[in-house]
Image (spheres, rainbow, N blue to C red):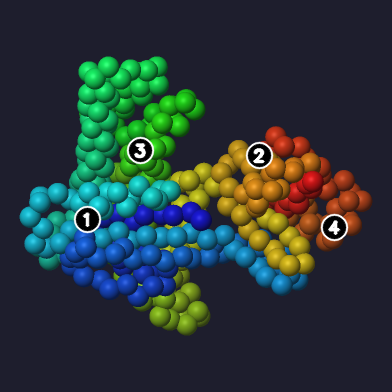
Amino acid sequence: MVKIGLLGLPKSGKTTIFNAVTGSDAKIKDYISQKEKPNIATIKVFDERLQYLSEIFQPQKTIYSAIEYIDFMGLSEDDKKGELFSSKYLSDLKTVDALAFVLRNFELPGKQTDSVSELEIINNELLFSDLSVCENRINTIKKQNKRGVTSADLDFELKLMRKCHERLNASKPLRQMDFNKEEQKILNSFQFLTQKPVMIIINESVDNFASEESITKEMPNELTCVEIAGKFELELNELEEEERQMFMVEYGINDSAINKLTRVSYDTLGLITFFTVGDDEVRAWAIRKSSTALQAADKVHTDLARGFIRAERFRISDLKEYGSINALKNNGKLYLEGKQYVVRDGDVIKIRHN
């Protein structure tokens, strides 16, 4: 399951966004102790293609892809460390697949609105965290060398850590660097925070929403950015569908917060969706772009990958056009693919295996 960590400064409305997106009722405070556990909720990824397949195949179960959103806690009001995030907080962040920075763009009494500065503060904290990890590892390897412990592997890792340290020390995240397979294998054990994919959520007031002076224009081009009027979205969730749609039109909100954030999450992680169908279940699967048929088989079950023979596939768009599996066969729209076939978004796949 995909895990997205929501990260933001105090009073950014991070928990409001979490509640609006997940339909949760997590308690909202000005400050929350880091001793408290994060709020966690899982949402189904709505996909009308899955609904269409379910109507056609009439399975016993219809299983959606899912995303887990984790609302990490912020500072305590009486925090005396002078640190933005505790070491436990940073350690927990390493478990997520991507980070969503929630930036405030609404007025508060006595607090200036500056989303760009908030982004810089969060970025710097993550840079410092990764820099500390690099420095600790470099020092550890040096101590081993002084004790006479040397090897080609240690030399390679030391060189890699120094390269990362130089990058971080220049205030540049690791996600913008290219690493080979051997380097990435080492980095995976550290789970550097600045190597994780990042998206930005601008938490707007409804009056600022989608204005011509959108703050999104000031965000880095390489980061996917979405505007959500968090407090207003919470209020919309309490309305009946017809009334909700009326207010969305009035305020220029074209889609719900959950649909927006789902799309941005998939884009940020480079995910596509393929489907499996049968009498027992019809199911949507999230997989990385450029994944092969063999990797798709492994996603469904390791036994399918181990005994892989061929992938039988068709396109949902073709099924809609021709109306049945038999019609797809008769018109050459049912394909057999090998292990290296690159899965496309909207493929329906059946794995033939030993």
In this view, the residue in front, 20 or 215, is 20
* Kind of residue at badge 4: Ile
Q: Earlier in the sequence, mark 1 or mark 4?
A: 1
Select label 2 or label 3 by which is in front: 3
Left or right: where 11 falls relative to 349 = left
On the image, the x and y values in percent for residue 151 come to 37, 18
Quarter residue 140 falls in: top left
Which residue position holds label 2? 292
| Residue occupying the point 27% across, 30% down | 137
Which residue position holds label 4? 325
Element assignment for label 2: loop
CA separation, marks 2 and 1? 40 Å
On the image, the x and y values in percent for residue 169 come to 22, 28
CA separation, marks 2 and 4? 23 Å
CA separation, marks 4 and 3? 47 Å
Element assignment for label 1: loop
Which residue position holds label 3? 190
| Residue occupying the point 72% across, 53% down | 348
Quarter residue 34 falls in: bottom left
Which residue position holds label 1? 9
Residue 172 shows up from this direction? yes
